Image: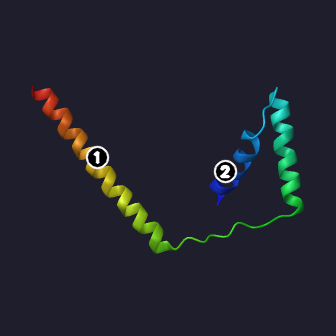
Amino acid sequence: MVERFFRDVTDFITAQSFASLAELSDAIIGFLAERNKNARRYVWRAKGEDILRKINAATQALTAQQAGSWWKLISETLH
């Protein structure tokens, strides 16, 4: 949920440009004040099973990629 909050802040500030750090800081404080006027809690909607499935798929893909990288490194070293 923290990542989601920071994504919202990032979306807000990247849509603008700032001439100084003070302007950026003021914009973030303004964003927070406006958001707090109509505060909404973040609600987790993802299912645990779906998250675990994605983690497992990513782990398998990374393992396969790393195995291929090691094999390539070894075979290049042997030649």
Task: Please tell me whether residue 33 is drawn above or below residue 79 in the rendered image.
Answer: below
Task: Please tell me whether residue 62 is drawn above or below residue 57 in the rendered image.
Answer: above
The quarter of the rendered structure image containing the N terminus is: bottom right
Residue tagged by mark 1?
65
Q: Tell me the number on the disc at residue 34.
A: none
Q: Check disc 2 and report its element: helix, strand or loop.
A: helix
Instruction: Please state if 40 lies on the left or on the right of 71 as rendered.
Output: right
**In the rendered structure, which disc, 1 or 2, sits on the residue that comes first in sequence?**
2
Q: Check disc 1 and report its element: helix, strand or loop.
A: helix
At horizontal 70% and vertical 66% (from top left) the residue drawn is: 42
Q: x%, y% of residue 44? A: 62, 70
At horizontal 40% and vertical 68% (from top left) the residue drawn is: 53
Q: How is the image coloured?
A: rainbow
The quarter of the rendered structure image containing the C terminus is: top left
Residue tagged by mark 2?
7
Amino acid at pointer 2: Arg
At horizontal 55% and vertical 70% (from top left) the residue drawn is: 46
At horizontal 52% and vertical 74% (from top left) the residue drawn is: 47
Instruction: Please state if 36 lies on the left or on the right of 8 as rendered.
Output: right
User: Badge 1: few (under 14), some or many (20 or more) residues near its Cα, within 10 Å?
Assistant: few
Snapshot quadrant of residue 37: bottom right
Amino acid at pointer 1: Gln
Q: x%, y% of residue 51? A: 47, 67
User: Badge 2: few (under 14), some or many (20 or more) residues near its Cα, within 10 Å?
Assistant: few
Snapshot quadrant of residue 5: bottom right
Q: x%, y% of residue 27? A: 84, 41
Q: x%, y% of residue 34? A: 88, 54
Q: Residue furthest left?
A: 79
Q: Mark 1 near mark 2, Cβ–Cβ under 8 Å?
A: no
